[in-house]
Amino acid sequence: MQVFRTVSGFRAACENARTAGLGFVPTMGALHDGHLALVTEARRHAPTVAASIFVNPTQFGVNEDLARYPRDLEGDLEKLQKAGADLLFAPAVEEMYPEGEQTRVSVSRVAAPLCGSFRPGHFEGVATVVTKLFAITGACTAVFGRKDYQQLAVIKRLTIDLRLPINVVGFPTVRDLDGLAKSSRNFYLSPSERAQALAIPAALAEAQDTFSNGDRDAAAIANRARKRIEALTDRIDYVEVVDADSLEPVVGNKIDHRALLAIACHVGKTRLIDNVVLGEDARVVLGEKA
Ligand code: AMP
């Protein structure tokens, strides 16, 4: 695997790979099996796979975890190598945000609800860095996790709106055996907090069962999930059932054929997000501990 620190070096490598096809997996590092599954997925689309590791400062709010975000470049290199990535871009902040920089990319409606209302500026930071990365890689198939469902929606929107030659692929959420979605932020959880966090996949699975049994009442499904989460976690940002495309409220509160149940809550100091698309995603499998 070739490692690049500069935009110019990475751009040239992408250019060489592009004729045969380039797959791209952007990450913030502290890699787990969820990230590595994206690398494997990218390989299905293209003979050369590039990953990036960049903890993007502009997507963190002032009171968020930028300074303590887990970093393990050595370990990440080994994992990416094993997963079969060919190129890795790991730039310094100044390489992505050159001296005097003043440009931001902002997506409006789809970035507004859910995490958008709890993390002001977050999606602007995401949209900006992803647009920069796409401008460097050029045409490619970029793979993102559905774990960050709204982020995926924002990136799909900006790719269409800016007419970028990027094929954006969403990959299903990879979970631990107990059902908890894999996340770099799970590293923060103590064993007892981790047990609390299992309320999240349990709530998602319950909602999927309710939906399978024919319930189409968006508010009722959300309320039930909220109760389950409330009992075990420390603070809820949101538990909502929304239209899976627009992320806006379900029209008439009646789910047509599919809808997104999205959850963001805090366990101790750690903010966790998760979701399922009711009527679309495979049922969340809960392990024995859940
Ligand atoms: P991050 O490093 O958290 O910015 O994530 C980088 C990419 O990995 C994003 O596209 C995430 O949606 C994706 N990702 C993170 N966790 C998971 C997971 N458990 N399953 C699938 N994709 C994931």
Image (cartoon, rainbow, N blue to C red):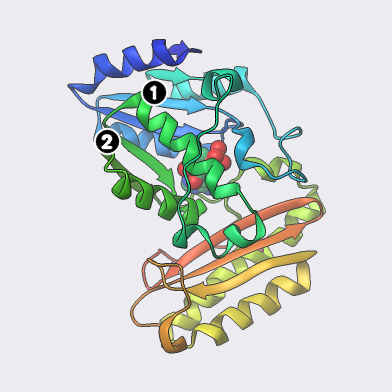
Q: How many marks?
A: 2
| Residue picked out by circle 1 | 84
* 153 on left or right of 225: left
Across and down, in percent, residue 39 comes to: 40, 33
Q: Which residue occupies the foreground of this view, 89 or 120?
A: 120
**Relative to 231, is 265 above or below?**
above
* 29 on left or right of 235: left
Categorize mark 2 by other alpha carbons within 10 Å: few (<14), some (14-19), many (20+).
few
Query: In percent of the image, x 40 and y 67: which residue is there?
Result: 246
Query: In percent of the image, x 23 and y 22: which residue is there?
Result: 18
Is the CB of mark 2 within 8 Å of ligand 1? no
Across and down, in percent, residue 106 comes to: 48, 48
Q: Secondary structure at mark 2?
A: helix
Q: Quadrant of the N terminus?
A: top left
| Residue picked out by circle 2 | 44
Can residue 1 be seen from the camera position used here? no
Q: Secondary structure at mark 1?
A: loop
Categorize mark 1 by other alpha carbons within 10 Å: few (<14), some (14-19), many (20+).
some
Q: Which residue occupies the foreground of this view, 105 or 20?
A: 105
Across and down, in percent, residue 146 comes to: 45, 53
Query: In percent of the image, x 46 and y 72: which residue is there?
Result: 248
User: Which of marks 2 and 1 precedes in the sequence?
Assistant: 2
* 195 on left or right of 137: right
- Amino acid type at circle 1 is Gly
Give residue 198's mark: none
Query: In percent of the image, x 57 and y 52: which residue is there?
Result: 181
Can residue 224 be seen from the camera position used here? yes
Across and down, in percent, residue 141 comes to: 29, 36
Q: Quadrant of the C terminus?
A: bottom right
